[in-house]
Amino acid sequence: MDFLAIESSCDETAAAVVRDGRQVRSSVIHSQAAEHGLYGGVVPEIASRRHIENVVWVVEAALKEANCSLKELSGIAVTAAPGLIGALLVGVNYAKGLCLSGSLPLIPVHHLRGHIAANYIEYPDLTPPYTALVVSGGHSHLVKVEDYTRFSVLGRTRDDAPGETYDKVARALGLGYPGGVLIDKLSKEGDPKQVVLPTPQLSGNKLDFSFSGIKTAIVNLLHNAQQKGESLPTADVAAALNQKIADILTTHAMAALDSTGDKILAVSGGVSANSLLRERLGTACEKRGVRLCLPPLSLCGDNAAMIGAQGYYQYQAGLIGSLSQNAFACMELEEEFV
Ligand code: KG4
Ligand code: ZN
């Protein structure tokens, strides 16, 4: 079964054709990052306008690359939550129009469920149950994946997401946008021991995260240096931040595995592209005899192939939307659209 998938929740307009939830027949991604970079972060209205301009050719290119017509599809999967509402509405509305013209079922997909499903593409034998760590620009979740469409959130960030922390620190340091990949690269030239960053201490759920204190600590260091007419050793700050985030995510992921007893950890989301995080998780999982699943870099950030993978399983579970489907800026991972 072939599904067309559309993703427009943030600053990537993406479309893909995915067969049986596992095989990517085409994947087209148009990134707006360069334009948002001029403003130091995503400008929601610009994102919506660019999606409007690009969604038609991106979808046409994905269908052409897969050598597939609307008639040959079994349905259209689209990210309907969470994300920038104006951006989501473009993808959802365009998907609805295509469903109407092709008499196809519409399958609304939760963006984070999509990120989790990226690993089904890379690992054809990966099946639930397992433990997932989803780390992106807007989210940080530890999840028990009970089944393809059943999830329990074990822990989540109480403030900033790790990607957001990278982006905000990079902006403060004048490095550019998106910050994660820039800090990842720069950190290789720095010494993390030169900059001491706090480790967040949370009461309550030990699997929750907090990253805003680390961001504030770096902004304070920056202000103090500026007041003294000094400059910060940017590469050392980048290395310290990279190490702190990788350590926190790895420690929490191992604690989540302790609580679930799972022997599989699947990691995904834009921050899963981080080289140090991949290395740390690799070492920790090997020590415990846990299988680590990590998507290739092309499937870490936002893409439509992952939405097509999850869309297939949502369809199999009968979770099909209608032409009155709405989009939602916020939605819990455990919630259903229908
Ligand atoms: O999953 P994604 O593409 O979009 C959201 O759903 O948010 O994640 C984007 C985030 C950005 O914050 C970006 O800075 C971060 O992923 N990112 C990275 C790396 N590459 C992208 N963070 C750390 N290291 C990287 N190599
Ligand atoms: Zn994402």
Image (tube, helix red, strand yellow):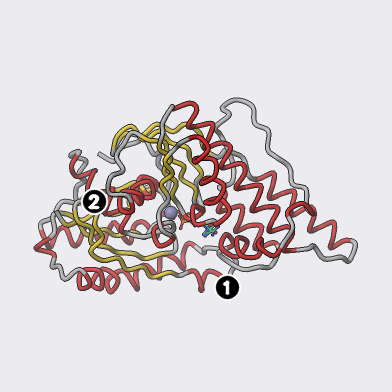
Farthest-out residue, right: 228
In the rendered image, residue 278, in percent from the top left (x then y), is placed at 52, 51
Binning the other alpha carbons within 10 Å of mark 2 as few (below 14), some (14 to 19) or many (20 upward) gives many
Q: Residue at x 61, y 56 (%)?
A: 166
In the rendered image, residue 239, in percent from the top left (x then y), is placed at 69, 57
Instruction: Identify residue type, mark 2.
Output: Gly
Which mark is on residue 38?
1
How far apart are the two marked residues, 2 and 1, measured between alpha carbons? 37 Å
Residue 45, above or below 300:
below
Q: Quadrant of residue 7?
A: bottom left
**Residue 132 relative to residue 55: left or right:** right
In the rendered image, residue 150, in percent from the top left (x then y), is placed at 31, 34
Residue 167, above or below 217:
below
Q: Residue at x 51, y 73 (%)?
A: 34
Q: Nearer the viewer, mark 2 or mark 1?
A: 2
Q: Quadrant of residue 209?
A: top right
Binning the other alpha carbons within 10 Å of mark 1 as few (below 14), some (14 to 19) or many (20 upward) gives few
Ligand 1 within 8 angstroms of badge 1 C-beta: no
The residue closer to the viewer here, 240 or 4, is 240
**Residue 86 relative to residue 23: left or right:** right
